[in-house]
């Protein structure tokens, strides 16, 4: 839709110094969560674990972009909605202890309790990766169909469809 195209022009904020494989991994994680595809998630995780800090940075960009899109479209999305959506998105996708850490860390993060969220991660940077990817999938599906979500994220991150 043309209004989306106009909205994206000012929203292209990915870090230019991050390699494309980090961007590809971020999109793949969001896509796996959007599809609720545990096999795809398992396939992407080794790449994600190679550089969780860079991936977290890229997923924060994704989350910020999608949060702005939700605001622009007028979809009502409150912290309680995000907590429920992230918990539902990671349900049965992760081992129980990691699912709990992601859900509880996101619950704290969504209300601005960063110190509490950090305690729930227990120093595991992958908790942030999972919670941001699950949030990206959940909030992204609030405004886009799955195929649109992946396509829009590729555009915003400066990747072509064929990459």
Image (cartoon, rainbow, N blue to C red):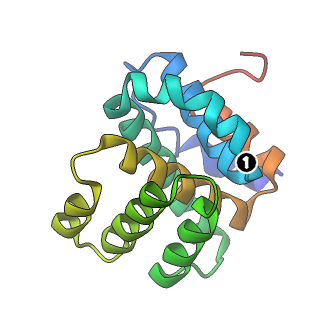
Q: Position of residue 30 (x, y in %)?
A: 62, 45
Vertical arrangement, residue 36 with respect to residue 156, above or below: below
Q: Position of 23 compared to 109: left or right?
A: right
Q: Residue furthest front?
A: 96
Whether residue 156 is visible = no
Residue at 83% across / 52% down in the picture?
A: 1
Q: Residue at x 42, y 59 (%)?
A: 97
Residue 53 is left or right of residue 38, and the answer is: left
Circle 1 SS class: helix
Residue located 26% across and 72% down the image: 112
Along the viewing direction, whichever of 97 and 5 lies nearer the viewer: 97
Give x and y (percent) for residue 72: 60, 67
Q: Position of residue 147 (x, y in %)?
A: 83, 44
Check the image and name the residue furthest to the left.
115
Res. 52 in view: yes
Q: Nearer the viewer, residue 71 or 118?
A: 118
Residue position for label 1: 149
Q: How many marks?
A: 1
Image quadrant for the C terminus?
A: top right
């Amino acid at each position: 839709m043309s209004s989306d195209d106009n909205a994206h022009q000012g929203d292209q904020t990915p870090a230019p110094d991050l390699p494309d494989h980090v961007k590809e991994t971020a999109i793949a994680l969001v896509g796996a969560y959007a599809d609720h595809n545990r096999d795809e998630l398992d396939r992407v995780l080794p790449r994600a674990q190679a550089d969780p800090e860079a991936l977290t940075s890229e997923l924060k960009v994704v989350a910020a972009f999608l949060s702005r899109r939700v605001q622009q479209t007028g979809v009502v999305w409150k912290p309680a909605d995000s907590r429920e959506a992230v918990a539902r998105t990671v349900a049965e996708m992760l081992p129980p202890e990691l699912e709990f850490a992601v859900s509880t860390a996101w619950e704290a993060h969504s209300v601005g309790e960063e110190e509490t969220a950090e305690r729930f991660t227990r120093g595991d940077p992958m908790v942030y990766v999972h919670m941001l990817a699950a949030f990206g999938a959940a909030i992204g599906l609030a405004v886009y169909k799955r195929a649109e979500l992946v396509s829009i994220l590729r555009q915003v991150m400066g990747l072509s469809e064929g990459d």
